Image (spheres, helix red, strand yellow):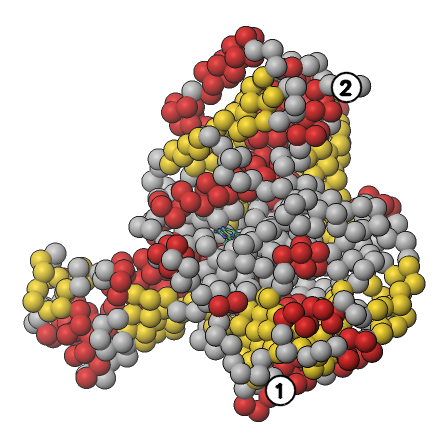
Amino acid sequence: MKNLDSKSHVRGESVYLDDIPLIQGTLYACVFDSPVAHGKLNAVDAKEAEQYEGVYKIITAKDLIGENQIGGIIPDEPLLADSEVHFQGMPIAIVLADSEENARKAAKKIAAEIEPLEPVTDPRVAAAKGDLIIPPKKFILGDTENAFATCDHVFAGRTEQNGQEHLYIETQGAYAVPGENGAIKVYSSTQGPTAVQRAVCRVTGLAMHQIEVDVQRLGGGFGGKEDQANAWACICAVATQLTKRPVKYALHRMEDMRMTGKRHPYSSDYKIGLDKDLNIVAYEVTFYQNAGASADLSPPVLERTLFHCTNSYFIPNVTATAYSCRTNLPPNTAFRGFGGPQGMFVIECAIAHAAEKLGVSAAEIQRKNLIFDGEEFPYGQIAESEAITTWTQGDEKYNFAQLQKEADEFNAASKYFKKGVAMMPVCFGISFTKTPMNQARSLVHVYTDGSVAVSTGAVEMGQGVNTKIAQVAAKTFGLPIEKVRVHTTNTQRIANTSPTAASAAADLNGKATQIACETIRTRLLEVAQKLVESASALDLSFADGFVHRNGERTSLDWQTLVMDAHLSRVNLSEHAHYATPGINFDWTTAKGHPFAYHVYGTAVVGVTVDCLRGRYEVDYVKCCHDFGSSMNTEVDYGQIEGGIVQGLGWMTMEEVFYDTDGKLRSNALSTYKVPDIYSVPKEIGILPLETNRENLAVLNSKAVGEPPLMYGIGAYFAIRNAVKAFTDCSPDFDAPFTPEKVLLNLHTL
Ligand code: MTE
Ligand code: MOS
């Protein structure tokens, strides 16, 4: 089934924040943000801006009624700079005007007197100075020190990974509308309506029941709106509080790129030890996460880097240490994979390094060390592994050796074009690693005309979660999907939501919806039992809009039954709660069972490099992917394709570039290149893994939002292999592998 939004999307009828009809008297906000990355803010001169045409008011930190604080996990992030600026793009003042244009022009008239301080942009420099967001985190399994002494081969090295701009098509934004008695309704382009509600309460000093947050859908989030939607919602809400007027702010692309954080860049050290049979015996890794100027979501992102530092492999001795380093960049944040890809990249580099030195293929080491059922992850959870199955089923379908052979033959015959192939296994844990976040609620109404409305905490951002939730309701009631509508995500209907993140939204909210629908279903079947004079409600079921008895359709249709139930005063609404069972994690021991389950997969990636120009094309990404049992292959295949392309972009052409002053140079689409239709793989192959194991996913349909992104990592190593086929070199592990870097490796000066 297609995504329910697909028709309105292609017709341009879907409603995003910027499409909400405006209320008379709406003011437009624009932020004046710091032109430098670090400094003492001595004065703000807004006199000229105040006089500017259409300007209604200018707000600075001292005007706030509540706390000047939006840090969700650690209170280290002022909404508006007061005494110091910590990154270029940090909001300093809010200009309110009668039009977007006047607000933006007036903001340019503001001047700040800033005494420059030395900016830090390198996480290792921050770590050396002890400037950490949180104390270091560590995972230990076995005993690496003694294990390394037993190894036949030990290799050590360093890797660099850059950030990634989210580039959601819809930029950040919010629209705040005043209500009665000081209440405020906030429309926000956010993945976390409750996070917005909490942040707005803090900066306005209002209670949560005075703030309503409503989200229709996002034009993409990718993690960038999990926490970072808060600032814009707070800016609008604060302005509404101070002016009693509706206030809107939809960021321009360049404002968004400059002022918001991105995927975390990491610098890492690794040491890998193998025995003579290529078993990885020991692995030591240290991650330096570039957190940016404040915590934002850096701590849990750092944790997930640790959770995924051994990817799909079983390694008996692991010591993994992670530092979250404070720098003068915009606070970096969640991005599809949430730190997991950064952890996986390093182990893949370590394996590639070992393979290169030992003269074997990386695939041999990868295959040999895949985790088995019953083996332990460094964090204590025991694997229910599909790692080997996805590899072998992928191999049967795609014939990995043959693909390698074709590349080798091509390379033997071609001088200036070289092909490279790499394998990329993926293992990704599903659940928020902070156990209390794994809960959700759903509110289901059956109206007297038989139509069904569902509200949950899930936010639709293109990933199709609303389609899946509607499917769950339709399936439970035996109704066609048209009978079900999923309403906006609204904090008045669903309270205390977890953000739509961790790929877990469909599982959590889908399960809550299933529970709510089943409760109503049971009530309706009891009514039906009397109407069709059945001995037991157990004989009855719903299908095709009718009540069935022992699988045979009766004359009682859904709508008649619903009306009858209502007249008999039966409750046609239900609010249900779901909390993932069986998960736990204890940070004092760094052990537990944090994930409901893992998603596995194996991809093979092939590329062709033009060795005169350094350009490359991705020929194919073919994967065997563990869907459990997909409830919607169209949506899920879309997630795989999109995830792969986003992962490829991160590893190849997307280059976030801050200069040493902390100024973003890749600040527009002219200087930041993302994959377009010409740079997507020529072929994406998706083979669903066939198993029928039980899992905790909704309708057994495993989460799919993030894991496929990590197949894209394979492109990095495929390009590296192609480069090595051209010239005897050993490129540094420095991602992304831009055409420029490829060229420099192909032709050493
Ligand atoms: N797909 C689209 N089209 N747009 C998005 O913003 N975000 C990704 C992924 N797929 C995203 C997407 C991220 S970061 C996550 S965590 C999941 O969707 C969240 O949705 P889910 O929990 O419903 O999978
Ligand atoms: Mo996704 S990075 O968990 O929003």
Which label's residue is closer to the chain start, 2 or 1?
1
**Left or right: 320 as drawn, with respect to 700:** right
Which residue is pictured at 81% across the width and 76% down the height?
48
Asked if residue 456 shows in the view, the reply is yes
Mark 1 Cα within 10 Å, few/some/many (few <14, many 20+)? some
The image quadrant where one finds the C terminus is top right
**Left or right: 64 as drawn, with respect to 185:** right
Asked if residue 433 shows in the view, the reply is no
Mark 2 Cα within 10 Å, few/some/many (few <14, many 20+)? few
Residue furthest bottom as drawn: 181
Quadrant position of residue 578: bottom left
User: Tag on residue 244?
Assistant: 1
Residue 325: x and y in percent read 78, 50
In-front residue for pair 669/346: 669
Q: CA distance from mark 2 to mark 1?
A: 64 Å
Callout 1, which amino acid? Answer: Lys
Residue 634: x and y in percent read 36, 46
Quadrant position of residue 200: bottom right
- The residue at which mark 2 appears reads as 748
The secondary structure type at the circle numbered 2 is loop
Which residue is pictured at 90% across the width and 70% down the height?
42
Residue 310: x and y in percent read 61, 36
Evaluate if marks 2 and 1 touch, with contact meaning CB atoms under 8 Å apart. Answer: no
The count of marks equals 2
In-front residue for pair 521/189: 189
Callout 2, which amino acid? Answer: Thr
Residue 203: x and y in percent read 69, 77
Which residue is pictured at 11% across the width and 75% down the height?
530
